[in-house]
Amino acid sequence: MGLIEAMHLGFMQRALAAGLLVAVMSGLLGVFVVQRRLSFLGAGLAHAAFGGMGLGAFVIVATGLLGSGIGLLRHPLWIAVPFSLLAALAIAWVRANTRLSSDTAIGVFFAVSVALGVLFFSIIPPDVNLGLSLMDLLFGSILGVTGSDLVVIAVVAVVAVAFLTATWGRLSYATFDDELARADGVATRRLEYLLFACAALVIAVSSVVVGIILMAAYLVIPAASARLLARTLTQMSVLSVVLAVVSTVAGLALSYLVDVPSGSTIVLTQAALFLVAALLARR
Amino acid sequence: MSEGAPGAPPLHLHRVLVRLGEAIILEDVSFEIEPGCFLAVVGPNGAGKSTLVKVALGLITPQRGHAALFGTVAGASPERVGYVPQLKTFDRSFPATALELVVSGLRRSWPTRIGVAEREQARAALARVGAEHLELRQLARLSGGELQRVYLARALVRRPSLVLLDEPATGVDFLAEHDLYDLLEGYQRDTGASVAMVTHDLAAARYHADRVLVLNRRVHGFGPPDEVLCEPCLERAFGHHGHHHALAF
Ligand SMILES: Nc1ncnc2c1ncn2[C@@H]1O[C@H](COP(=O)(O)OP(=O)(O)OP(=O)(O)O)[C@@H](O)[C@H]1O
Ligand SMILES: [Mg+2]
């Protein structure tokens, strides 16, 4: 079956829709991740999401929710999202109120979350069918995106894009120079908490699609390529979203044509575009 | 918008105490200036001059006492204050043009797209400081003096009623050093604004300021330049007493 016919298949349409939503929100968020040097936060929160998924899966099995008729309630995301949110706020708090750097705080949550995830997944009896495998969690399963996954992703995408566009001017100002922004009445501390919370939401739902291992790439590579070519932050933001969308569409198509997991083809497409950007910017 | 009482002093500090960590940086600092005043703040390195400016901006909240601008609490009306920081601490990897920085001074937020009217205003501000040719240059690639000019344009573009400048002459080759003062005095004549400037240039303070504040943790003198910039007063502030640094270039 050719690529065009394949696009009539429900799972391919859901994959494309999920991929585009993830591309747009992570492309936009990525601008602030890159400019604020938070790529480790991206990786850390993806792993926090893994811990949250483990906890979620355990709670669902232990409370018998798995047998319930409501599809959304059976999804461990309901636990993983608040779990990641808490981790993000805790990291922001440690960063603001202790002498520890955010790297140290992230490093701790990173390890604890993975340890928790492994613990919970190992105590769930192997015969229980959760509808998601460990491999899917690690590497994503864009072709396995369900209708209810898509609903959750769409809701988060709307919230994240609305937040990022509404605060873009103040967030950028604070990113440029925190003190200058504060002198002009911008509540930079509060904005940072909101940004971290937004990152937690985006990363938790996106990692269902792209997997926790490759999540950081989505946040960093398109924005970094955009940075190489842009002269203003506006240009960088637009370009980052465009590059994220292009690499998602191209990566999905490639994945179908050569029958390779899409997470890998998307990230490799991002990397190829980064290389092109680096060559163009060398002038 | 908080306008404050009419005729309220542009800048008023009352018994301000600032402690950062263990150290007392400012102690019992009180003074006020009248509208239209040109205040020079002088004192040795580490005297607390930049800290004082940050208190006036509302960036640092004093542990004791208070700071008021135009009769309202410091930090409450940022649109009335134009600030030139001593250290340009902005993120050097941030893609930004000089024009955008100036427009951020107009909007108090980072610009997405710049409108025609804003562009004109920003260009005029850059022209006033002799930096119109820098408009589209990347900030990270500007020299220290070029950057200083752009920051000055950014502070003045919003037509503030109080200009707070922390060592604005550093690195700027303003012709015969008079251009900067001409510019500020011209701005004051046009708008009736007040200026508070931290400087190490005692001669300029003597010549241009209406009021001089000699600071070294405490207020060592406050008044007209010819009264305050006298030997004994400067000796107390700059001499060995309460003087931390030994290095003088
Ligand atoms: N965040 C901080 N924590 C602790 N001490 C600080 C902090 N910031 C400044 N200081 C100290 O406060 C003192 C006053 O600093 P400030 O920057 O106000 O001095 P200054 O008069 O502007 O000096 P300069 O002429 O060198 O610019 C210095 O001794 C400095 O080391
Ligand atoms: Mg200083």
Image: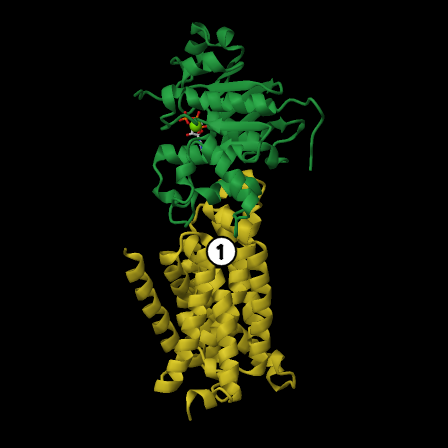
**Dot 1 amino acid type:** Ile
Q: Which of the 4 quarters of the picture holds residue B64?
A: top right
The picture's colour for chain B is green
Q: Nearer the viewer, residue A158 or B146?
A: B146
Q: Secondary structure at mark 1?
A: helix
Q: Is residue B24 visible?
A: no
Q: Nearer the viewer, residue B70 or B66?
A: B70
Chain containing the residue with disc 1: A
Q: Quadrant of ligand 1?
A: top left
Quarter holding the N terminus of chain B is: top right
Report the residue at 49% width, 61% height from top.
A29
Neighbour tally class for label 1: few under 14, some 14-19, many 20 plus, Cα within 10 Å:
many
Residue A212 lies, with reference to residue B239, above or below; the image says below
With B247 as the anchor, is B32 left or right in this view? Answer: right
Farthest bottom residue in view: A1
Report the residue at 41% width, 90% height from top.
A2
Residue A224 lies, with reference to residue B22, above or below; the image says below
Quarter holding the C terminus of chain B is: top left
Mark 1 sits on what residue? Answer: A91
The picture's colour for chain A is yellow
Residue A81 lies, with reference to residue A164, above or below; the image says below
Q: Nearer the viewer, residue B21 or B119?
A: B119
Q: Is residue A255 visible?
A: yes
Q: Position of residue B59 (x, y in %)?
A: 54, 36
Colour logic: by chain
Q: Position of residue A79 (x, y in %)?
A: 57, 71
